[in-house]
Amino acid sequence: MIELFRDPEMARVGQYQSILEAEGIPTFIRNETLSGTEVVIPAFYPALCVVDDKDHARAVEIIRSYEQETPGSDKEIACPKCGELSPGSFSVCWNCETALVPTAS
Ligand SMILES: [Zn+2]
């Protein structure tokens, strides 16, 4: 199981989950029950994971193409460590899990 995406907004994580499930990729949400009105540290944000490691690259592509169809969220963030581009809504690099700093828009 590989973490794919992490976001303080459970609704968003759930949205991506339905997109991936619709593509036939089994997913799992970690920390689902911890979401709410309380401020939590990023380590406990709801996290969308792919159950099967081999689906990971495809899942990234699906989310990436989904984001490119969404106005205003088509920015990609370059990882400060490995240089891979992640979709702009990602908070950690999909490749090496380094924390990403969103570029100012
Ligand atoms: Zn990276």
Image: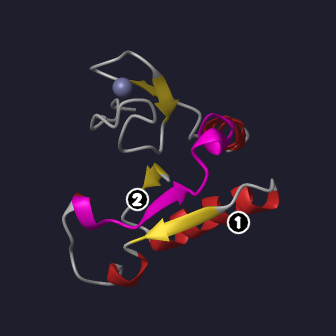
Q: Is residue 104 left or right of residue 26?
A: left
The colour mode here is secondary structure
Q: Mark 1: which amino acid?
A: Ser
Q: Is mark 1 within 8 Å of ligand 1?
A: no
Left or right, residue 34 beside residue 73: left
> Looking at this view, is 23 or 12 the one in front?
23
Q: Is residue 104 left or right of residue 40?
A: right
Q: Is residue 67 magenta?
A: no
Give the labeled residue for mark 1.
18
Dot 2 falls on a residue whose secondary structure is loop
The image quadrant of residue 12 is bottom right
At 45% across and 20% down in the image, what residue appears? 84
Residue 11, above or below 104: below
Of the numbered discs 1 and 2, the one sitting upstream in the chain is: 2
Per the model, the C-alpha gap separating discs 1 and 2 is 15 Å
User: What amino acid type should be assigned to the residue bearing mark 2?
Assistant: Asp
Image spot of residue 15 (x, y percent):
63, 65
- On the question of residue 79 being in view, the answer is yes
Q: Nearer the viewer, residue 81 or 87?
A: 81
Tell me which segment is drawn in magenta. 43-59
Measured as percent of width and height from the top left, residue 50 is found at 57, 54
What residue sits right under mark 2 in the picture? 7
Q: Is residue 18 above or below residue 37?
A: above
Regarding ligand 1, which quadrant of the image does it lie in?
top left
Please provide percent x and percent y for residue 58. 69, 37
Q: Secondary structure at mark 1?
A: helix
Q: Nearer the viewer, residue 24 or 64?
A: 24
Residue at image x 36%, y 65%? Answer: 8
Q: How many other residues sit within 10 Å of disc 1, few (<14), some (14-19) or many (≥20)?
A: some
